[in-house]
């Protein structure tokens, strides 16, 4: 009987520890929205506080890093964005894989980029803070009618 109680208490404490360590969907979604808002508003210093200096990005037109992201920030004219369908998978207690859609209204270098984009980000907990270490997004293609 004592073993059963001990195992039950261990399982209870372990589940509480995991739930405390894992971020809520709302918290990471808020970080993601903040990163998008900083990018939209061209607030590079605030953007750098949310993402790792070693940020890696993958887009249809190539790979990017922190400096390239900051350079492209000045070329964007983003009027609005709305995130939806936000999902998180915890790879471990300090790594969150996030997928979502973002509806963007804007241009980059005069080219219209408006539409729905499929996105993915990886956030990592380091020194008590969540920072984005990877991001990808690609504009959804129109589904051909049959």
Image (cartoon, rainbow, N blue to C red):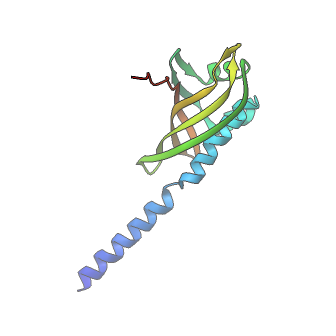
Q: Residue at x 39, y 22 (%)?
A: 146
Number of marks in the image? 0
Residue 134 in view in this figure: yes
Position of residue 6 in the picture relative to residue 20 (left or right): left
Identify the image quadrant of residue 42.
top right
Pick the front one: 91 or 74: 74
Q: Which x, y percent locates residue 69?
A: 63, 23
Give residue 97's position: percent from left, percent from top: 46, 41
- How far from the left and from the top, in percent, is residue 109? 70, 13
Is 50 situated above or below 55?
A: below
Looking at the image, which residue is at 59% across and 46% down?
29
Task: Report the quarter where the N terminus lies.
Answer: bottom left
Q: 68 or 25, which is in the foreground? A: 25
Left or right of 42, for residue 91:
left
The furthest residue to the bottom: 1
Image coords of residue 14 (percent x, y) = 39, 66
- Left or right, residue 13 beside residue 119: left
In the rendered image, which quarter is residue 114 located in? top right
Quarter assignment of residue 115: top right
Q: Is residue 128 visible?
A: no
Q: Is residue 69 above or below residue 91?
A: above
Q: Which residue, as the protein is rendered here, is positioned at the far front? A: 146
Q: Residue at x 51, y 28 (%)?
A: 136
């Amino acid at each position: 009987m004592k073993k059963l109680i001990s195992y039950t208490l261990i399982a209870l404490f372990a589940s509480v520890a995991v739930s405390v360590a894992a971020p809520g969907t709302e918290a990471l979604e808020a970080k993601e929205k903040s990163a998008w808002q900083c990018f939209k508003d061209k607030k590079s210093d605030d953007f750098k506080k949310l993402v790792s200096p070693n940020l890696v990005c993958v887009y249809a037109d190539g790979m990017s890093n922190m400096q390239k992201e900051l350079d492209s920030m000045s070329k964007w004219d983003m009027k609005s964005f709305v995130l939806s369908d936000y999902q998180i998978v915890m790879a471990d207690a300090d790594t969150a894989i996030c997928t979502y859609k973002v509806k963007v209204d804007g241009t980059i270098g005069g080219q219209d980029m408006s539409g729905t984009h499929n996105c993915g980000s990886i956030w990592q907990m380091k020194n008590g803070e969540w920072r984005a270490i990877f991001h990808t997004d690609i504009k959804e293609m129109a589904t051909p009618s049959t």
